[in-house]
């Protein structure tokens, strides 16, 4: 499940305003490459909406089926806000709809019990006359 945690106003190249919903997945444990210690984090992604600001505000806290996954993409530069450091990334996080599990279709056999058993009388059979023989 993912939760809507916020919204932001964005603008298209043509200058039209719209809102994106910020989604956050469940918490996960990650091991630091530098210290070897674990920390807790959650993946976040944005998704476009057709909603007005009041609707986006009202949706905060809503849970949706699905998850936020790491997806490979073309390399791009990203500025770390706290340090100002510029890094190159080759992934982004995207919302992925929950896959609905479907049971495989089972077809009924057209064979009868007698059809299945007719060739089973051999030397490994338990009984050929219906009686236990040693």
Image (spheres, grey):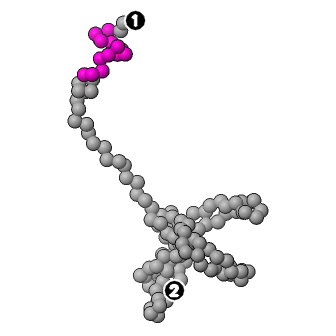
Q: Give the percent coordinates (x, y) of residue 5.
A: 55, 74
SS state under label 1: loop
The spot of residue 43 in percent (x, y) is 59, 68
In the rendered image, residue 101, in percent from the top left (x then y), is placed at 40, 54
Would you place residue 130 above or below residue 5 in this image? above
Q: Is residue 55 visible in the rendered structure shown here? A: yes
Q: Residue under circle 1? A: 134
Q: Is residue 114 left or right of residue 79?
A: left
Q: Residue at x 44, y 93 (%)?
A: 14
Classify residue 113 as left or right of residue 132.
left
Q: Residues within 10 Å of mark 1 (few under 14, many from 20)?
A: few
Determine the residue positioned at 51% across, 86% down: 9
Q: Which residue is mark 2?
A: 9
Residue 43 is covered by the magenta coloring: no
Q: Quadrant of the C terminus?
A: top left
Residue 92 versus residue 103 in the image, above or below:
below
State how many labels appear: 2
- Looking at this view, name the residue that lies furthest to the front: 74
Q: Secondary structure at mark 2?
A: strand
Q: Which residues are magenta?
A: 118-131
Residue 84: image quadrant is bottom right
Looking at the rendering, which quadrant does residue 52 occupy? Answer: bottom left
Kindly give the residue lying farthest to the top in the view shown. 134
From this viewpoint, which residue is outermost toward the right? 35
How far apart marks 2 and 1 lie (CA) works out to 84 Å
Which callout, 2 or 1, points to the residue nearer the camera?
1
Whether 115 is drawn above or below 6: the answer is above
Residue 3 is at least partly visible in this image: no
């Amino acid at each position: 499940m993912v939760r809507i945690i916020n919204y932001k106003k964005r603008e298209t190249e043509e200058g039209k305003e719209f809102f994106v919903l910020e989604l956050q997945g469940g918490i996960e444990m990650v091991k630091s490459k530098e210290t070897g210690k674990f920390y807790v984090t959650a993946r976040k992604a944005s998704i476009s909406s057709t909603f007005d600001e009041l609707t986006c505000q009202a949706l905060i806290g809503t849970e949706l089926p699905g998850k936020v996954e790491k997806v490979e993409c073309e390399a791009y530069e990203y500025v770390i806000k706290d340090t100002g450091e510029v890094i190159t990334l080759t992934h982004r996080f995207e919302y992925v709809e929950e896959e609905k599990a479907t049971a495989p279709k089972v077809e009924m056999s057209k064979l009868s019990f007698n059809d299945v058993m007719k060739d089973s009388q051999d030397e490994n059979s338990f009984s050929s006359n219906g009686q236990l023989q040693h």
